[in-house]
Image (cartoon, grey):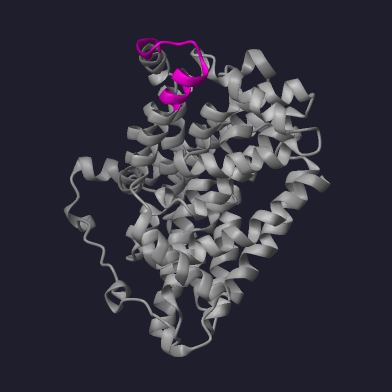
Amino acid sequence: MLERMGNYFSRWAQKYMPDPMIFAILLTLLTYVLGLIFTKTTWFGMIQDWYKGFWVLLKFGMQMCVILITGYALAVTPPVQKFLRRLAIIPKTTAGAAMLVAIVAVIAGMVNWGLGLIVGAIFALEVGRQGYLNNRKFHYPLLVAAGYTGLAVWHGGLSASAPLLVATKGHFLEKEIGIIPVSQTLGSTLNIVVIIVLLILVPLVFYMMSPKDESKIKTINPELCEVMKDEGTPKSEWTFADKLENSVSLSMIIGLGGLIYIFYYFGTKGFKLNLNIVNFTFLFVGLILHKRPVAYVKAVSEGVHGCSGIILQFPFYAGIMGMMKFSGLVAVIAGWFVAISNGATYPVFTYISACIVNIFVPSGGGQWAVQGPVLVKAAETLHFSIPKTIMAMAYGDQWTNLFQPFWALALLGICGVRARDIMGYCIALMFVGIPIFIILLLIF
């Protein structure tokens, strides 16, 4: 049944799903129209509000770019890749292979969303290669879909945008809610239970979606199994500049400086995570594991390609936030939430609304910027927990990444498949998980 669901939704996505930038534009227009209808702001006033907010997320956008880049650079370090290759030879069947890829992607996604995306892609590719080289028929699109699942769990992990942002001094809602430590969000009983459930649910669903009919199995393209050759300059021909670029000592010295501060930070502040320390940690760990500065520069250059969507779309998300905030639309929408919610149902409505908004704003940070002011006002009116509100939004944001292929672009490029090849399986998982999230939010 799950296999048929996946095939159906793949055909639907291929026919109706536009580019993510179109979603950003449509949401901008929708917000503008809603502002005209439900507030007293004039047509030109809404445009002014749009511009007021347009550039306020530049710092946060840069932080998101660094997360993606450092996550990629860490994922392609030789020790990480060597470990993934050893794991890749374990599975013997498609079901086992898909389950293993999902486990790796989910765990990596919990550590860092950029790491989860790239590790999931690289591991799916490596499992597909090992299957081909060892004459094992693995359904490659299913493996790649499983490799994408790190983006379905990341917002409850260590790189969670909204929880880390509200734990960072100077965040845009600090006057309204203050600084909320991650112990109240990521370390809550609710989030710990959700993590355990996802670690079981996601791999199990992919195991069950494995095609039983071998004639329906689509193996990896043999061209993707070709071994890449190192075309670096021979060491005997190195110039002085080449020696500096390949100096292990330079990487270790600067890396040691970074590690000293990291140990100092956690030794004095405890496990107090925010975007800056997460980015700092992954940057220097990746630099040390790459050993040579030029190798790290190359990895970062490759990772930069995945940032184009963030650079282009974040200002539009900030503009949406500006229209909602300065026009008073935030207060109006907060009233709608209060009208249909009570203390018991509010987290469910928050989760569902976040699922929907994420389709139009495929960014956890961008979505919190748009939805956060609304949710906070509604929660304060209902005297509901702000930390749980944040996590309910985080779960909704992450889960419909299984429907929105924006973040899959880097994975698709690495694995050599099309979005329509994998999205059906992702959407099937999405529908299986929605009622489970609702139940957990009601219980905890």
Q: Quadrant of the N terminus?
A: bottom right
Taking 307 as reference, is 289 above or below it? below
Residue lying at the far front in this picture: please name it: 37
Measured as percent of width and height from the top left, residue 94 is found at 52, 80
Q: Say whether residue 216 is visible.
A: yes
**Residue at x 56% of width, y 65% of height:** 102
Which image quadrant for residue 395? top right
Residue stretch rendered in magenta on the structure? 31-45
**Residue at x 55% of width, y 31% of height:** 368
Measured as percent of width and height from the top left, residue 250 is found at 38, 39
Q: Nearer the viewer, residue 18 or 109?
A: 18
Q: Is residue 29 one of those drawn in magenta?
A: no
Q: Quick check: 413 left or right of 436?
A: left
Measured as percent of width and height from the top left, residue 289 is found at 46, 50
Taking 134 as reference, is 346 above or below it? above
Magenta stretch: helix, strand or loop mostly: helix
Which image quadrant for residue 140? bottom left
**Residue at x 46% of width, y 46% of height:** 71
Q: Say whether residue 180 is visible.
A: no
Taking 59 as reference, is 98 above or below it? below
Q: Nearer the viewer, residue 362 or 112?
A: 362
Q: Is residue 43 one of those drawn in magenta?
A: yes
Q: How many marks?
A: 0
Q: Nearer the viewer, residue 28 or 77?
A: 28
Measured as percent of width and height from the top left, residue 253 is found at 45, 37
Q: Quick check: 80 left or right of 221?
A: right
Q: Quick check: 82 left or right of 24?
A: right
Q: Quadrant of the C terminus?
A: top right
**Residue at x 54% of width, y 84% of height:** 92
